[in-house]
Image (cartoon, rainbow, N blue to C red):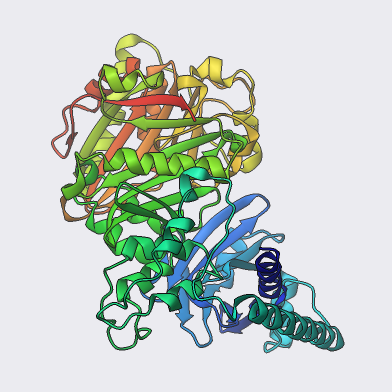
Amino acid sequence: MSKNILCVIFIVSFLQTGISNNQISISVSQEGDNIILTCVLNGNDSLTQVNWEMVQGSNHTKLGIFHPRQGFHIFSEHSGNVKIQGQQPPQASSSLSFQREWKLSNLKESGRICCQFVTFPSGSMKQCTDISDAVITSVLISPAEPHDAGQKQGLFGQFGALTVGCILSLLFLTISIYTCRRCFCRRQVLEIQHVYTDQSMFSEMYTEEAREVQHTPSPSGFDPTKLYAKIKEDLYYGRLWKSYQGKARVAPQGCLAGIPYNLRQAMEAKFVDESEGLTFWLARPQDYEEVMAISHDIYQGNDYLPHRYHTWMTEHDRVVIIGRRNGKLVALDSALVVDGGQTVVLEGLRVCPSERGHGVAGVIQRVTDSYIKHVYPSVTTKRLTRNDNPGPEKLSKFTFLACRAILSLCGDAESFEGFVSGLKSKLENTEKSNGTYSNHQKLFVLKDSYQLKTLVLDTDLSLRLQLPGGAIIQDWQPLKPMESNLEILERRNLTWLVDCVNEKTMFMSFHTPPYPVPFSGGSLRFNIDMFGTDVSIARKALIAHLEQILEEIHGTVLVHIYMPQTFWEDMRQFCDGDDGVRQHRDYGEQLFLEKEM
């Protein structure tokens, strides 16, 4: 027993003391009027994705994404001004180019541009560089010299670190080989001792598998003892083998000989749990196509996940779990930890059509709850929003916090300019008939993070605006108005409107940039959230939000306006009567629910 423990300690020590040679170098160059930033990944990791973003103080603005298989994607607000290219391994790299005029108009002197490499197995690595005028000037003088964002290590320092690392590695390798040989040279059956605090995930597992080791080889020639040797490096593979046991297949050419293809593919993911014939894993970018395959007609084509899935893969404090049955993806659930680690917001739940109605949704939700409690022990509450009434029985399991009304509009992009003009005429006629020219009810756009912080942290904001459940619900995500949630709101790239800046705010609204959804073969979805008690300001806000996106919409456009229930009938009448833009659905509701973990 003691020898086994000592051996495991030496193996873990050896695995953790190796010096990783994975690092990112950034170089700045210029071609004509274009500034080019090139990030190169030095190492042997497998490249999954490269994210480019612009950082100014606490503001993080996403510029675009390079994916080795899917190509590149530039966010709409920077389309035409920014170009992204990439190169796959053996030397993975990505470059971002832009004109100097764009830099002067979008990036302050203290701003930086960052590239984030998402790799396997090292995970996420990020490097940033400033592109101030001083740096650009130095590029013109010596364009071939790379600009490193981190501290530079001298030649002798690097050589010394490498020497010490090699000596330590050889020492631990020698000790671990000697100890392992003494511990296991006479062992016929592999025994695994493992202590894990989460009994729901790993209890009574390894003793069962130890009894199952002695069985006849599979017809395909797969030797299970080789797989069990792998358990010494990662005990998750023990559960993996159990879920695929007895289903060995001949691997196609190019795969590891003797290991079933589906098994080897699944082993690349991180195992979470197993329940009721399903295995659960943390989702990966390469699972995208399978997730889309189970998402047909979700939300009647208004599904946000095709657009946000890859962002979820790198979002801070985001957990995405998928469920598989016999290797086939059948379910997905996601959760975002907010409110300073106290609350988790559930969203994205979906089950493939053939598994619906069989309790799969409940199983994956329980697995997600268990994983969240294990990884984020500070979470005490879970919250969710939904657009359908689940009935008294299910509602009794939650605390009902609030209900908002939803007004949905639909039309071709070409029709919205006339629609907005009609709304302006209606507003003017209404004010004339009422004799209330509310010029004092002007709306202001928040310009920076300081104004946003002042607004959100106003202690009386919730009472004055009658925030639903005391939360700011942004595109179905409820967030308490607290400082820890400011970063989440800022990275959403929202456009905020308020009725005043320096005085007490009585009305607030914001919209997300239009994004693509599957509706009608491909459409744009535009969400507006409104908070307050004065519907006359809400009418003006609707016009202002629509005016700001007229130049960037195309094709079919779906507009969803989330508002207090008292606004709905007035807003419906205000939007009624246009032939090009019509009401898309009847009265809808957004329920805000809460439950203790």
Q: Name the residue rendered at 58%, 70% in the picture.
A: 122
Residue 70 visible in rendering: no
Which residue is nearer to you in this view: 594 or 138? 594
Which residue is nearer to you in this view: 409 or 184? 184
Does 236 sit left or right of 543 as displayed?
right
Residue 467: give x, y in percent of width and height.
48, 21
Residue 181: give x, y in percent of width and height.
64, 82
Looking at the image, is 307 positioned above or below residue 174?
above
Which residue is nearer to you in this view: 511 or 174? 174
Does 461 sit left or right of 303 as displayed?
right
Q: Quadrant of the N terminus?
A: bottom right
Which residue is nearer to you in this view: 537 or 300? 300
Quarter residue 568 falls in = top left
Residue 118: give x, y in percent of width and height.
52, 68
Residue 552: give x, y in percent of width and height.
34, 53
Looking at the image, is 227 positioned above or below residue 398?
below
Looking at the image, is 56 positioned above or below residue 125?
above
Residue 228 visible in rendering: yes
Looking at the image, is 53 positioned above or below residue 218?
above
Does 204 sit left or right of 590 as displayed?
right
Q: Name the residue rendered at 37%, 61% in the picture.
A: 242
